[in-house]
Structures are given as C-alpha cells and as structure tokens.
Amino acid sequence: MFSDVMPVENLIAFGAHFGVAAVVMLLFAALWLWITPFKEIALMREGNSAAAISFGGTLIGFAIALAGVIRASNTIWEVVPWSLLALIAQVIGLFIVSRLMHGVTRHIDKGENASGIFMATVAIVIGLLNAACMGG
C-alpha cells in the first residue's frame, strides 16, 4: 500500500541523497572547524554566542549550496563532485571576506555578536549564490 503512494525507488533515492548530503555536511563542518583560527566548539561551550552565530550561519550557507547541488543533479553520482565544488567555493568566499574584514575573527573570538552576525550573513549569501549557480 505504501509503495502505491511513494514508490520504493523514490525512498531509496531519498535515502541515498540524504546520506551523501549528511556526509558532505559533516566533512564541511569538520574542515571549517579545522581551518578557522579559533575553536568554535570550545567557544560555544563557554557561551560565546558570536561563535555560535558565525558557525551556524556557515552551516546554513553550505546547506543552501548543498540543496542547490542536489536539486540540480540528475544522479547521486553528480552530487559528490558538485558538492566538493560548492565546499571549495564556500571556503574560498568566506576566507576572502575574513581577510578583507581584517580582525573579524578576533572579534568573534572575543564574543562580539556583530562580527558573528556579519560572518553568518556572508556565509548565507555565498551559499545562496552558490546554489543559484549550480542550476547550470
């Protein structure tokens, strides 16, 4: 009965795409935590909301890009290389902005929310642009 409403192959495709997306998100998060000059997890545990806002925005931005990749891909095999491209674009974009806004990471490290909000916003904008460009 359930297969009449939703074919099994659609459930399998959903599971495969979701699994790949989850792995790519985890890889992005791990890479981001490794390359940033401050330790977001430790800062968040200490109650630093600027670090939480910045990291949360970064995850949202990449999730938006990843959603664009999945939507534009015809097969699961297209998702992986395009996700890696989206990951690279997101990291490069955020790196450039953090260099242009000299000292922004120090402000996040000190818990200054304005810098965390700014970096979160930039990450989301990059993710939106990234997703829009994935449609070909």
Image (tube, grey):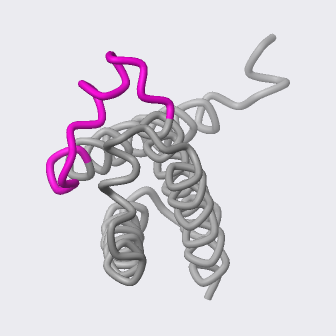
Q: Residue at x 60, y 84 (%)?
A: 133
Image quadrant holding the C terminus, namely: bottom right
Q: Relative to the observer, which residue lies in front, 111 or 36?
A: 111
Q: Residue at x 42, y 62 (%)?
A: 79
Image x and y of residue 16, in percent: 44, 39
Q: Vertical placement of 127 versus 130: above or below?
A: above
Q: Residue at x 49, y 44 (%)?
A: 112
Q: Residue at x 22, y 54 (%)?
A: 36
Image x and y of residue 68, in percent: 61, 65
Residue 87's quadrant in the figure? bottom left
Q: Relative to the observer, which residue lies in front, 60 or 65?
A: 60
* 52 left or right, relative to 110: right
Image x and y of residue 85, in percent: 35, 75
Residue 37 on the magenta span? yes
Image x and y of residue 23, in percent: 32, 40
Residue 40's quadrant in the figure? top left
- Please provide the residue range marked out in magenta: 33-49
Residue 71 on the magenta span? no
Image quadrant holding the N terminus, namely: top right
